[in-house]
Amino acid sequence: MSADTTLDRLLDGRVALRQSAGGYRAGMDAVLLAAALDAKPGEHLVEFGCGPGAAMLCAAARLGEARFTGIEKDAAAAELARENIAANGLDPRMQVETADIGSLGNAHRADQVFFNPPFFDDETRLRTPKTEKRDAWLSGPTPLGIWIRAAARTLKARGRLTLIHRADRLGDILHGLEKSFGSVVIKPVHPREGQPAKRVIVLARIGGRAPLQLLSPLWLHDGEGHSAEADAILRGRAVVQMG
């Protein structure tokens, strides 16, 4: 193992993840995103900005008959993702492409797209991150709307998009979905009961016509530890129900 990486375990040790020691490190958001996915046998799921592969590895560990493609513009992160796929024995149904979603075409025709995009479009909104974490935190020339439009180009008719983002960006998310997506489902994620939501998990379908659904919240913590529901999800024993 390289000195500039660490070997971590997700889903109660079922998923091995080697990732940068000093750069962006995948955590709870990736596991929650993966737990919100569902897929039929043979479906093709594409993750934008897959990094070292945390979310798609967790999803693939549960969705054993689906295929996955990760898109990652950072060559080092993409190579880590390939190594993690091999280390987890998932080579036959997973691949990683080094590409920028801002210039992604419509070649994949995926059944689903999912992503955990950079949280900030404006560098003044946060303390300057480490150089190694900059691309993961700051969207730069690829703001949220471009991620959503790229998903629309990538998906088949009736394809689904699932994303996790800051709760205060929900208005921007809904605005971005207006043109191509419908049947929107929103799952608020709160640190604790009585506290405002910090994250939202959003599911939408190309051309969907069903009314928007706002689901019951997920509370992450209870007392000094995780809530029973969050603990089960993070251990891979339960899923995030998206309606």
Image (cartoon, helix red, strand yellow):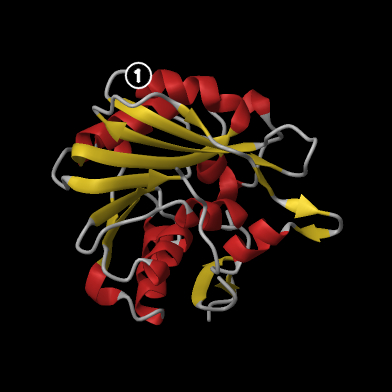
User: Picture coordinates of residue 111 (x, y %)?
Assistant: 22, 48
Q: Disc 1 marks which residue?
A: 178
Q: Image point 52% across, 45% down: which residue?
A: 136
Would you identify the image quadrant in which residue 212 lies? top left
Q: Is residue 118 visible?
A: no
Q: Image point 33% across, 27% down: which residue?
A: 210
User: Picture coordinates of residue 8 (x, y %)?
Assistant: 59, 73
Would you identify the image quadrant in which residue 45 lies? bottom left
Residue furthest left in the image: 107
Would you identify the image quadrant in which residue 159 lies? top left
Q: Is residue 95 visible?
A: yes
Q: Image point 65% across, 57% down: which residue?
A: 230
User: Picture coordinates of residue 25 (x, y %)?
Assistant: 59, 58
Residue furthest right in the image: 223
182 horizontally vs 18: left or right: left
Q: Nearer the viewer, residue 92 or 125?
A: 92
Q: Nearer the viewer, residue 151 or 229?
A: 229
- Compared with 189, 29 (above or below) is below
Q: How many marks?
A: 1
- Secondary element at tag 1: loop
- Compared with 42, 8 (above or below) is below
206 horizontally vs 78: left or right: left
Amino acid type of the residue tagged 1 in the rendering: Glu
